[in-house]
Image (cartoon, helix red, strand yellow):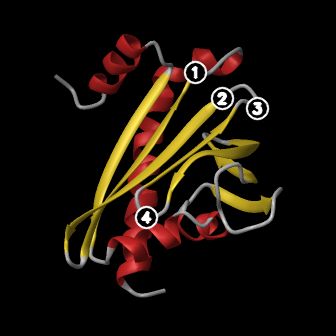
Amino acid sequence: MSKNILPLIWSRVCGMGVDVLTRIIINRPREAVANFAAAPSNAPRWYVNIKSVEWKTPPPVALGSKVAFVAHFLGRRMAYTYEVIEFVPSQRMVMATAEGPFPMETSYTWQSVGEEQTEMTLRNRGNPSGFSKLFSPLMVPAMRRANRKDLARLKLLMEQGR
């Protein structure tokens, strides 16, 4: 079975339009990776598609924080505000938005897999509506590619100590 079809089946079973989970091992301690990745101001440095970030509540990130992002994905400009709905420092962060045609939840988890290694997961899931719903089968592989690039960029930044 094709690797690209499994997420489509999973999203149908779960009742979600898209559900993409991506993992990477980063050769840095968990706290260093989590502190960098959980800081929304760092997002444009490692997310290829995120162009700008604007805090709507005062930093640093905490439960209830709100942050506006501008991104470009599949040739479209997307502006949305995430709210942090779950935050356990150095372990888990979940952000959600109900705005626009593609309500989305993004979650990060961090686990130590050695003294100096961290497994980070990035999960995006949501239920597109309206015109975006027609393209949800195409979004899964595109999101997976984007997430892999983003995590690879994060790994490079973290391992080069930037």
Q: Position of residue 33 (x, y in %)?
A: 41, 71
Q: Which mark is residue 127?
A: 1
Left or right: 37, with 80 as reference point: left
Q: Label 2 vs label 4: CA separation?
A: 26 Å
For the residue carrying disc 4, how many other residues have a C-alpha within 10 Å: few (<14), some (14-19), or many (20+)?
many
Asked if labels 3 and 2 touch by Cβ distance under 8 angstroms, the answer is: yes
- At 76% across and 32% down in the image, what residue appears? 99
Of tags 2 and 4, the one toward the viewer is 4
Q: Label 2 vs label 1: CA separation?
A: 6 Å
Left or right: 68, with 5 as reference point: right
| Amino acid on which the number 4 mark rests in the picture | Ser
Of tags 3 and 4, the one toward the viewer is 4
Residue 89 against residue 9 in the figure, above or below: below
Q: Position of residue 128 (x, y in %)?
A: 62, 21
- The secondary element bearing badge 3 is classed as loop
Residue on which the image places disc 3: 99
